[in-house]
Image: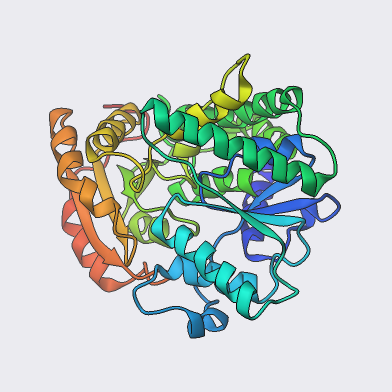
Amino acid sequence: MRSLQHLLTVYESRNDALPAEVQSRPVVACVGADVPAEVLTAAGFVPFRLAGRPDRHEAAEPYCGPGIDRLAVSQLARLLEGDAARTAGLVMSADTEGSVRLFLYLREIQRLQPRATVPRFTFFDLVHLPQRTSAAYNRARLDQLVEEISSWAGRPVTDDRLRTAAELHDRVRELIRTVGTRLRSGPGGPRLTGAQALAVIGAAFLTTPEHWCEAVERLLDDAGRLPALPGTRVFLTGCDHDHPDAYEAIESLGCVIVGEDHSWGALAGEASVGPAYDIRSALVRAGALQAPAAAGHSAAVRAAQTARMAAACGADLVVAWARCHDDAPPWDVPAQRAALQAVGIPMLAVPAQRYGEERNENVRSLLEPALRRPARAAGVTR
């Protein structure tokens, strides 16, 4: 299927300095799930989410201690080695402790040992709290970001342009949800492996929204040609996954990952902005109060979300996956386990794994007993 293969190819471009798909357009690199892509699109930039690379860390080692998330160390190495040198800038956010440390380290390195290969950069701090004061703070930070991105673009980012961009990115989010309901948890059974779905959704962060929407619409048109996949249906919660190794480790045991609540996967489709007169307040509200992630929301909110999403995709088992030095997700596990018990879905928590070392025998030996149950027949739902 050409449509699926094309999206897989786009996803693989996350390891490149810049993908061929967007090399003719001005690009702004992004770190973290809280960066409002709508602001960049409204300014005429292509948002490109900077993934880590488990094999790239040497350039950052002299600056980082042993207790830092290796994903952030890898991203710092990529930046220091010039992987974002051809971009128009870099926007970082505070979605995890690792992202915050990345910004602080990069800012200090550029102050003391400036490198021409590191583009100009800024930081967007979004507070994930429901209070009115938090909303006012978030709105001020967004206004500040809009002003700075306008200066990068050399033209004002108007509210009309923001509305147009929000409609476009809402279409992306709608299609992410449709991929879930039609190709992952539909009545005919899963049509994509979890690793394939991760690539399809992840490609949305690596090319223009227009191009991604066209490719996914073609994929959905071809969905009937994809065979149903048997196996135990697994829902994945916990840390972010910007590469497929954990998915492949789990799916090698005869199951299919049919959903997840992290920002490189299905969670990216949960926070639509919708039509709004005050588009800036709508943008920060969508980012702050919807699609909660572990680092910014209470365990109770996270648990309710996990139970809702896992039940919606007919999961047989929820696997909570943690990464070393990304300390927020494990705190959610007790509340998640209780919420899932209420809807009849068992949960397995995997001890924290090192970034880039997800495929190992210890994980396999832990998962195998939990997955030794009758596999769900294709086409049968919970």
Instruction: Write the residue at 35% across / 48% down.
Output: 295
Instruction: Write the residue at 64% across / 73% down.
Output: 110
Q: State left or right for residue 347 relative to residue 47.
A: left
Q: Quadrant of residue 353?
A: bottom left
Quadrant in which the N terminus appears: top right
Q: State left or right for residue 206 relative to residue 333.
A: right
Instruction: Write the residue at 35% across / 70% down.
Output: 354
Q: State left or right for residue 171 relative to residue 180.
A: right
Q: State left or right for residue 208 relative to residue 352.
A: right
What's the colour scheme? Answer: rainbow
Q: Where is residue 381? Give x, y as percent.
A: 31, 27
Q: Where is residue 380? Give x, y as percent.
A: 32, 28
Q: Where is residue 163? Give x, y as percent.
A: 69, 23
Observer-nearest residue: 67 or 134?
Answer: 134
Observer-nearest residue: 63 or 213?
Answer: 63
Q: Quadrant of residue 2?
A: top right
Quadrant in which the C terminus appears: top left
How many circles with numbers are drawn on the protein? 0
Q: Is residue 312 above or below residue 322?
A: above
Q: Quadrant of residue 86?
A: bottom right
Residue 278 in sight from this viewpoint: yes
Q: Where is residue 372? Give x, y as percent.
A: 18, 52
Residue 232 in sight from this viewpoint: no
Instruction: Write the residue at 52% across / 77% down.
Output: 55
